[in-house]
Amino acid sequence: MAIVDLVMPKMGESIMEATILKWHKQVGDAIKMDETMLEIATDKVDSEVPSTAAGTITSILFNVNDVVPVGTVIAQINTDGGAEAAPAAPVVPAAPVASPAPQQAPAAPVVTAAPPAAPVAKASSDGNRFYSPLVLNIAATEKISMAELESIHGTGNEGRVTKKDILNYVANRSAAPVAPAPANATPAATPVAASPAPASSVVASGNVELVEMDRMRKLISDHMVRSKATSPHVTSFTEADVTNIVKWRDANKAKFEKQYGEKITFTPIFIEAIANCIRKYPMINASVDGNTIIIKKDINIGMATALPSGNLIVPVIRNADTKNLLGLSKDVNGLANAARNNKLKADDTQGGTFTMTNVGTFGSLMGTPIINQPQVAILAVGSIKKRPMVLETPAGDVIAIRNMMYLSLSYDHRIVDGSLGASFLTAVANELEAFDIDRSI
């Protein structure tokens, strides 16, 4: 009997674990190659995991809502197939023996016994242990020092600390000081113990409805709070006359779609202008690590996109500065369609160096967007409105109806000063206003 292990796939460069959302197959079911086996969720996106073999499922090693490190065996398939292979239940007890650690990892009560395992923690912290950005952000929010982080027992690959590990540590750390009440640690315990209170002290009065945040909304909430806590936000505003862009698109959108099979929206035009200006102002395309500024040579522009649930996600157009309008249109349309159909991959949302959000899609004239960490700037474009404007002409000033749009740029004031932020924003507006109305498609 040939048994094939199905492992938790690596969904992206910095993704070290995933949560099981739903099993599409059960023990004894037949499955085809590449048929969907289960759905998983990472910090970025939800994804379907296909089977890597055809046959009969003999064991499923994890339950729904379990958090599983990448590379861990999550199910086994008998590739000999046939209806007679279904009763291969004896394999089930053997599977947990082969991988006891993954089954213990998701169980919160077991982790409470982890702190005494000091030799394991020390062994994995002799070198610089890898920590995912999510773990580091949680540590910063909870004021966990690096020395304290190094002491946390990790259940991930090669002893890495997972999100579940650090959250369990935080819960145990806040609970532990409560027992020795007479000790001197009482003052320190007071603020820590107060933190869980908001979650359990919801007081509903009047005609209200209480709605629990879904998983994605919780992630967005945490991300926004961390961004505000990390970056001192400053927002600058300007407006751009995009009449030439509107007229060019109206005149060419049907021809563009017929010739290339792609719809031309305003988004790729905006992204093209942003990429051109980032070349002139590379400090906008950066991140901060302590006192070090990391200037990114690749220009990977994220575009905030609405999901069917109403939540927003930011797929990334890589090397946007190297693509023409057709290439950008294909990327924009492809990523937007994938987002609408919940088909985005984890890699589609990683590696962004700058973000654009179109608040005008929802009718807003302008907005003050929150920086998408670890980037240092985000640009919002508002809705395009016709307004009377004063134009300078050789014959004198005239009033004309123009298509106007507000632009706003939020930037991290730790490294982006007002002069740089305003200069970049003005450059983008000028780039849009200089759009060639006679441009060929």
Image (cartoon, rainbow, N blue to C red):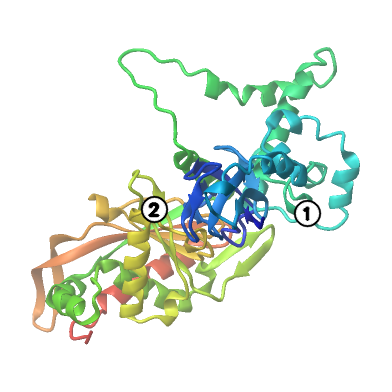
Task: State yes or no: discs 2 and 1 in contact (Cβ < 8 Å).
Answer: no
65 with respect to 46 (left or right): right
Question: For mark 1, does the 10 Å Cα neighbourhood hold few (<14), some (14 to 19), or many (20 or more) residues?
Answer: few
How far, Cα to Cα, is label 2 from label 1? 32 Å
Above or below, 114 relative to 175? below
**Residue at the image position 54 percent from the left and 65 percent from the top:** 351
Decide if residue 229 is in sight here: no
User: Where, by quadrant of the figure, is residue 184 drawn?
Assistant: top right
- In the image, residue 284 lies at what x, y percent? 50, 67
Q: Label 1: which residue? A: 158
> Residue 73 shows which numbered tag?
none
Decide if residue 175 is in sight here: yes
Q: Considering the image in quadrants, where does the C terminus appear?
A: bottom left
402 with respect to 219 (left or right): left
Task: Say which of 344 and 288 sits in front.
Answer: 344
**Residue at the image position 30 percent from the left and 53 percent from the top:** 359
User: Where, by quadrant of the figure, is residue 433 drawn?
Assistant: bottom left
* Residue projecting furthest to the right: 119
- In the image, residue 44 lies at what x, y percent? 51, 52
